[in-house]
Amino acid sequence: MGREKNIKKIFNLKIIKWIGTLLLLGIVGVCNYFYNYYSCLIRILDVLLVAMLAIFVLLKTEKGKMLLLFIRSSKVELFQVIWPTKRETCQATLVVAVVTVLMSLILWGLDSILVQIISLALRL
């Protein structure tokens, strides 16, 4: 019985955290809409403050912790990527540009030939 009670408390706490986060974000939207006569700077600071509070509450949930772990592992992965040099990037860009020009010339030529064939067929 005690274990079920603890599980229920944990579940209720999760729900309260999620509702609190959504409520905070909703309050920001409503207040920003209704208090538009305040200075824009004050409203921006208000939005940033409440958004940071909502993110803090969100990161205390299980899904938030998983998201934070994913972001950290993505950052580690980002540093392990072998990025191309400037020369390789320029060469790849040049290849793409040349292939694009060649394909456009080929399509233009085919289009011209087809137009001539169709106009010849219509004259008959």
Image: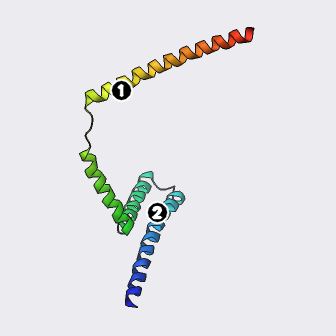
**Where's the C terminus, which quadrant?**
top right
What sort of colour scheme is used for the picture? rainbow
96 vs 53, nearest the viewer: 96
Which numbered disc, 1 or 2, marks the residue that appears first in the sequence?
2
Dot 2 lies on which element? helix
> Looking at the image, which residue is at 24% across and 46% down?
80
Instruction: Say whether residue 90 is left or right of residue 29.
Output: left
Three-letter amino acid code of the residue under disc 1: Thr
> Looking at the image, which residue is at 27% across and 49% down?
77
Picture quadrant of residue 84: top left
Extreme-bottom residue of the structure: 1
Residue 25, which numbered label? 2
> Looking at the image, which residue is at 40% across and 23% down?
97
Instruction: Say whether residue 81 is left or right of residue 108.
Output: left
Give the CA distance from mark 1 to mark 2. Answer: 43 Å
> Looking at the image, which residue is at 62% across and 15% down?
114
**Where's the N terminus, which quadrant?**
bottom left
Q: Position of residue 37 (x, y in %)?
A: 51, 55
Callout 1–callout 2 Cβ contact below 8 Å: no
Q: Which mark lies nearer to you, 1 or 2?
A: 1
63 vs 28, nearest the viewer: 63
Q: Position of residue 2 (x, y in %)?
A: 38, 90
Dot 1 lies on which element? helix
Residue at the disc numbered 1: 93
Above or below: residue 105 compared with residue 84: above
Picture quadrant of residue 83: top left
124 vs 96, nearest the viewer: 124
Picture quadrant of residue 49: bottom left
